Every structure is written in C-alpha cells, then in structure tokens.
Image (tube, grey):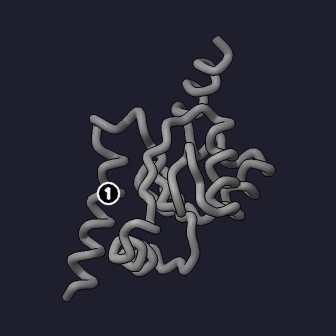
Amino acid sequence: MARLVSSSLVRGLVRSCRAPSTAENPVIIFMKGYPEAPRCGFSALAVKVLQQYGVSITARDILTNMKLKESVKAYSNWPTFPQIFINGEFVGGSDIILSMHQKGELKGLLGDSAQKGEQDSAQ
C-alpha cells in the first residue's frame, strides 16, 4: 500500500511537467544533488548535456528523501539515478541522454523547448 501512495507522489511530480503552468519546464530530473551542485558524476553529466539545449530543468534530490528515491525506482522500473523525464515521459539515465545527444535525437525530443533555449542563449 505504501508503494502505491509513493508511486502516486512520483506520478504527480511527473504529471506536473505536462501542466500548462509548467509548459516552460518540460524536463524533470531525479538526481543526486541539484543542477547547480550535483553530487555524482552521472548526475553532473546529465545536467551538462541538458543545459546545452537551454531548457529549464526541474530537479529533485533523491539523497534527501529515501522514500522518493525508492518510489521513483518503482515507478520507472529503472534501478539507477539520475532518472530523466521529458514531457512527462521517462527517458532514462545519463547514458541514454548522452547517446541521444550524440545521435542528434535529444533536440527532437525536447522540441520547441530546445529551440527556445538555444535562441535565448544566442541573444
């Protein structure tokens, strides 16, 4: 029963990425630390890759909330962190994000958010 409640919390956080009020923030990352202070190399790599697109990143530190950490793992059925959700859909970890970036696939997944971020960065 606790797992269901915890999964509901995670679903709510992920769903918030789809809400009109957070349309400007389509990326949520469950990571060790925060984008400005990652606490592991994989989290730092994921943030670095995502920041190249200029998108806003919503982050949750799983090290400060073990219940959240376990709930996210159960929800995504993915054992490691960071875990990246884009437009409310689980994408994967830093290795997948890096691979998608290298293949040119990440920009398409980020859609208009990436293009807006790149334009903002260029100005």
Q: Secondary structure at mark 1?
A: helix
User: What residue is drawn where x is 79% and y is 50%?
Assistant: 103
Q: If the image is split into quadrants, where does the C terminus sit?
A: top right
User: What residue is drawn where x is 24% and y is 70%?
Assistant: 8
The residue tagged 1 is 13
Q: Is residue 69 left or right of residue 8?
A: right
Given residues 99 and 5, the one toward you in this image is: 5
Q: If the image is split into quadrants, where does the N terminus sit?
A: bottom left
Q: Is residue 9 left or right of residue 76?
A: left
- Three-letter code for the amino acid on which mark 1 is drawn: Leu
Q: Is residue 68 above or below residue 16?
A: below
Image position, residue 31 (x, y; %): 52, 61
User: What residue is drawn where x is 33% and y is 76%?
Assistant: 67
Image position, residue 55 (x, y; %): 54, 35
Given residues 6 and 41, the one toward you in this image is: 41
User: What residue is drawn where x is 49% and y is 63%?
Assistant: 90
Q: Residues within 10 Å of mark 1 (few under 14, many from 20)?
A: some
Residue ranking furthest to the right: 102
Q: Is residue 18 left or right of residue 51?
A: left
Residue ranking furthest to the bottom: 1
Quarter residue 13 falls in:
bottom left
Image position, residue 107 (x, y; %): 65, 40
Quarter residue 100 falls in:
bottom right
Q: Is residue 30 above or below residue 114?
A: below
- Count all numbered tags in the image, as a single digit: 1
